[in-house]
Image (cartoon, helix red, strand yellow):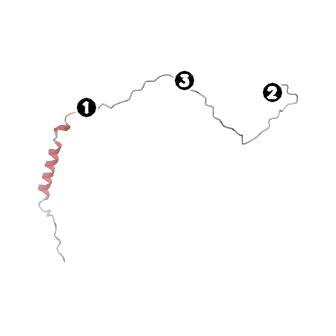
Amino acid sequence: MKKTKHLFKTKGCNIPFTSVMMVSFVLMGCNDQSTQPTKPAIPEVGVYTVKEEILPLTVDLPARTASYRVSQVRPQVDGILEKRL
Protein backbone atom coordinates (compact mmCIF):
# COMPACT_ATOMS: atom_id res chain seq x y z
CA MET A 1 0.00 0.00 0.00
CA LYS A 2 1.28 3.47 -0.86
CA LYS A 3 1.52 6.18 1.68
CA THR A 4 -0.07 9.46 0.64
CA LYS A 5 1.51 12.74 1.53
CA HIS A 6 -0.72 15.54 2.67
CA LEU A 7 0.37 19.03 1.80
CA PHE A 8 -1.36 20.54 4.81
CA LYS A 9 -1.45 18.98 8.21
CA THR A 10 -4.83 19.51 9.79
CA LYS A 11 -4.27 17.89 13.16
CA GLY A 12 -4.11 20.53 15.89
CA CYS A 13 -4.33 23.37 13.38
CA ASN A 14 -8.12 23.74 13.31
CA ILE A 15 -8.56 25.57 16.62
CA PRO A 16 -5.88 28.29 16.10
CA PHE A 17 -6.90 28.81 12.47
CA THR A 18 -10.58 29.08 13.38
CA SER A 19 -9.88 31.50 16.22
CA VAL A 20 -7.73 33.74 13.98
CA MET A 21 -10.45 33.79 11.34
CA MET A 22 -13.15 34.63 13.91
CA VAL A 23 -11.09 37.51 15.34
CA SER A 24 -10.43 38.90 11.85
CA PHE A 25 -14.16 38.78 11.00
CA VAL A 26 -15.03 40.56 14.25
CA LEU A 27 -12.46 43.28 13.55
CA MET A 28 -13.77 43.72 10.02
CA GLY A 29 -17.26 44.22 11.43
CA CYS A 30 -16.10 47.00 13.77
CA ASN A 31 -15.67 49.53 10.98
CA ASP A 32 -16.90 53.05 11.95
CA GLN A 33 -17.94 53.98 8.42
CA SER A 34 -21.10 51.92 8.53
CA THR A 35 -22.39 53.65 11.70
CA GLN A 36 -22.49 57.10 10.08
CA PRO A 37 -25.78 57.62 8.23
CA THR A 38 -25.24 58.67 4.64
CA LYS A 39 -27.70 60.85 2.79
CA PRO A 40 -28.96 59.39 -0.47
CA ALA A 41 -27.95 61.31 -3.56
CA ILE A 42 -30.68 63.56 -4.93
CA PRO A 43 -31.66 62.22 -8.35
CA GLU A 44 -31.63 64.61 -11.29
CA VAL A 45 -35.06 65.01 -12.88
CA GLY A 46 -36.30 66.65 -16.05
CA VAL A 47 -39.00 69.33 -16.06
CA TYR A 48 -41.41 69.77 -18.98
CA THR A 49 -43.86 72.63 -19.53
CA VAL A 50 -47.27 71.45 -20.74
CA LYS A 51 -49.24 73.66 -23.10
CA GLU A 52 -52.64 73.28 -24.71
CA GLU A 53 -52.82 72.39 -28.42
CA ILE A 54 -55.49 71.48 -30.92
CA LEU A 55 -54.93 68.03 -32.41
CA PRO A 56 -56.69 66.63 -35.49
CA LEU A 57 -59.22 63.93 -34.67
CA THR A 58 -59.46 62.50 -38.19
CA VAL A 59 -56.86 61.62 -40.75
CA ASP A 60 -57.64 61.15 -44.46
CA LEU A 61 -55.78 58.25 -45.98
CA PRO A 62 -55.89 57.41 -49.70
CA ALA A 63 -57.27 53.88 -50.05
CA ARG A 64 -60.01 51.75 -51.57
CA THR A 65 -62.31 49.38 -49.80
CA ALA A 66 -64.02 46.29 -51.13
CA SER A 67 -66.56 44.12 -49.39
CA TYR A 68 -66.11 40.40 -49.24
CA ARG A 69 -69.89 39.75 -49.39
CA VAL A 70 -72.60 41.32 -51.50
CA SER A 71 -76.24 41.33 -50.39
CA GLN A 72 -79.48 42.63 -51.84
CA VAL A 73 -82.04 44.39 -49.68
CA ARG A 74 -85.63 44.00 -50.90
CA PRO A 75 -88.75 45.45 -49.33
CA GLN A 76 -91.18 43.09 -47.59
CA VAL A 77 -94.31 45.16 -48.31
CA ASP A 78 -96.31 45.92 -51.44
CA GLY A 79 -96.37 49.42 -52.80
CA ILE A 80 -94.38 52.04 -54.63
CA LEU A 81 -91.36 53.80 -53.20
CA GLU A 82 -91.77 57.54 -53.45
CA LYS A 83 -88.48 58.55 -51.87
CA ARG A 84 -85.18 56.87 -51.00
CA LEU A 85 -83.40 57.81 -47.82
Which residue lies at the image location 15% right of the left edge and 51% below the top edge?
21
Task: Sort mark 2 into few (<14), some (14-19) or many (20+) by Cα contacts within 10 Å.
Answer: few
Which residue lies at the image location 39% right of the left edge and 27% below the top edge?
47
- For mark 3, give the secondary structure: loop
Which residue lies at the image location 18% right of the left edge and 76% below the top edge?
2
- For mark 2, give the secondary structure: loop
* Residue identifier under label 2: 84
Of residues 49 and 27, the one drawn nearer to the viewer in this rendering: 49
Which residue lies at the image location 12% right of the left edge and 52% below the top edge?
20
* Residue identifier under label 1: 39
Q: Nearer the viewer, mark 2 or mark 1?
A: 2
Mark 2–mark 1 Cα distance, whole angstroms, equals: 79 Å
Examine the image and state in which quarter residue 36 appears.
Answer: top left
Examine the image and state in which quarter residue 48 appears.
Answer: top left
What residue type is disc 2 on? Arg
Residue contact at pointers 3 and 1, CB within 8 angstroms: no
How many marks can you see? 3
Mark 2–mark 3 Cα distance, whole angstroms, equals: 39 Å
Name the disc covering residue 76, or none: none
The image position of residue 40, as x and y in percent, is 28, 33
The earlier-in-sequence mark between 2 and 1 is 1
Position of residue 49 relative to residue 23, above or below, is above
Q: Nearer the viewer, mark 3 or mark 1?
A: 3
The image position of residue 77, as x and y in percent, is 85, 31
Residue closest to the far top: 52
Task: Sort mark 3 into few (<14), some (14-19) or many (20+) by Cα contacts within 10 Å.
Answer: few
The earlier-in-sequence mark between 3 and 1 is 1
* Residue identifier under label 3: 54
Q: Is residue 31 left or right of residue 48?
A: left
Mark 3–mark 1 Cα distance, whole angstroms, equals: 45 Å
